Amino acid sequence: MSDDRLGIALAQLNPCVGDIDGNLILLRDARQQAAEAGADILVATELVITGYPPEDLVKKPAFLDKAEEAVQALAADTADGGPAVILGAPWRENPETRKRDGHLYNAALVLDGGEVRAVRAKWDLPNYGVFDEKRLFTPGELPGPVEVRGVRLGLPICEDIWSEDVAECLQENGAEALIAINGSPFEIGKQDQRLQLALQRIEECEIPLVYLNQVGGQDELVFDGASFVLDAGRNLRVQLPAFDPAMAVTWWTRDRLGDLSVADGVRTDLPDGHAAIYRALVLGLRDYVDKNGFPGVVLGLSGGIDSAISAVIAADALGPERVRCVLLPSPYTSQHSLEDAAEVARLLGCALETVDIGPAMQAFDQMLKPLFDDLPTGIAEENVQARARGVALMAISNKFGPMVLSTGNKSEMSVGYSTLYGDMCGGYNAIKDVYKTQVYALAHWRNQHLPHGGFGPEGRVIPERVITKAPSAELAPDQKDADSLPSYDQLDDILACLIESDMSAKEIAERGHDTETVSKVWKLLEGAEYKRRQAPPGVKITARNLSRDRRYPIVNKFRG
């Protein structure tokens, strides 16, 4: 610590899993910025060199070799006398003996003076929800602090600060501040939960805490950044933005008692409520499309609320010029649906084309007539329509390259109100974890707000009639969702009780729901598991999505 002043630069980056060369470039650029700002130390996030979460990529020795080569290259850079680097990486070295022992650690590394100076392994490996680190990494020992540029720093890694053990161990062994590097995904209410957790750790340890979090989309996860710094008095000193990469230098001094204190820095207002959810959906879709190299997306516009909000999210994520909208009318498609869909595309400035599926329906009718004979029409014929639409969209995708964007909401996906290889086909679904009632709320919000960083137009983008009309799949004459399902207010509350809270039918009925309706919804939820296993991935925003958070057997007779 020179002249009793220390500059710690926080790099809230958006790495890409597997792009080790690209992630190294991000880190080198960040270190250059830190050096130009006069910082002494650069801190980056959990497993930033590989991107987080790397999942089973870490089982490949060649992948680990590449990651370690990148770490050593960055360590060599620090021989120039510029900022030291603290970053996360997978590491095959025993953090205590500094010898290879066959174990793999999720580690925080200190690079300085041209070498890897210290290694601290993650102690508390999460093994719930979307996390399964215990099958990939070896837990470290309770860590001690490391000395970096004259300051003793504790380096807990993400889950390590969710209990008091690691922080207390570091403080008891002389840590002057905690620098927590994280890969913490967004979910509703998570930002406040992290802040309260950090305040609790400071109350116990009475030393400052830096919470540095990754930003960006990775498959179904969205990392919201929102990094912050709290002083020993639990005061917020620095707040980085949510959903955007950022770099900030924090300045530290010793007070007259020799304790570290941090000066006030940038404090960005964070989005909350519908704004935060919408930003997460936009970032998740944008990074999925861009990191996978798709030129854009194509989706079917039905005139309904789900495809409308999906098109708007896509326009905000990618720009209207990268969103291709298609009308796919059948004989049952109402004129107002065609008008409403066309108006959505016009308001967004997206390309709009029409593919009539009537001829495909007639062809299938002729093909299947010898089998179906004179049987009454029903679900089979309805599903043919949905699948004809899916075939058309996939053909456009195959011919021109845009990814098909699926548009089913969480309510529909929960109860199987969707068609395999029809409206469920696609590469990604921005609203997969958004209940129908939330879809309506987000539509109202977006009509009044252009999100920060959104590429779509300002003002109303979803016509009022799309929001107010009764939802319908329009696969049969005068069809309405209410013919098959409870009202969405009722359905969504029951589903949230079943999915997020694992409540029993009796407990749900005590909330005022009809017992027969609860049993029906439960049966639909469990019976649709086979469909959900084949659904495209989508942005996770709730505490429990219908993918890795909730793993139920497909063959399942329990209805307790």
Image (cartoon, rainbow, N blue to C red):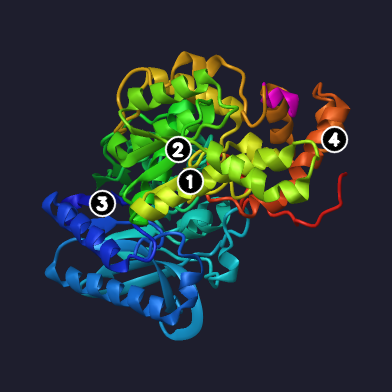
Residue 519 disc label: 4
Residue 204 visible here: no
Q: Which residue is the site of mark 3?
A: 8
Give the mark nearest the N terminus, 2 or 4.
2
- Give the CA distance from mark 3 to mark 2: 57 Å
**Amino acid on which disc 4 is placed:** Ser
Q: Which residue is the site of mark 1?
A: 392
Give the mark nearest the N terminus, 1 or 3.
3
Q: Which residue is the site of mark 2?
A: 355
**Amino acid on which disc 1 is placed:** Ala
Give the mark nearest the N terminus, 3 or 4.
3
Please, what secondary structure does the residue beneath circle 2 have? Answer: loop
Question: Disc 1, disc 3: CB below 8 Å?
Answer: no
**Magenta region, main secondary structure:** loop
- Give the CA distance from mark 3 to mark 4: 56 Å
Sort mark 1 into few (<14), some (14-19) or many (20+) by Cα contacts within 10 Å.
Answer: some
For residue 250, above or below residue 144: above
Residue 159 visible here: yes
In this picture, which residue range is highlighted in magenta?
478-485
Quarter of the picture containing the C terminus is top right
Give the mark nearest the N terminus, 3 or 2.
3
**Residue 55: where, in percent of width, then height?**
50, 65
Mark 3 or 4: in front is 4
- Give the CA distance from mark 2 to mark 1: 8 Å
Quarter of the picture containing the N terminus is bottom left
Give the mark nearest the N terminus, 4 or 1.
1
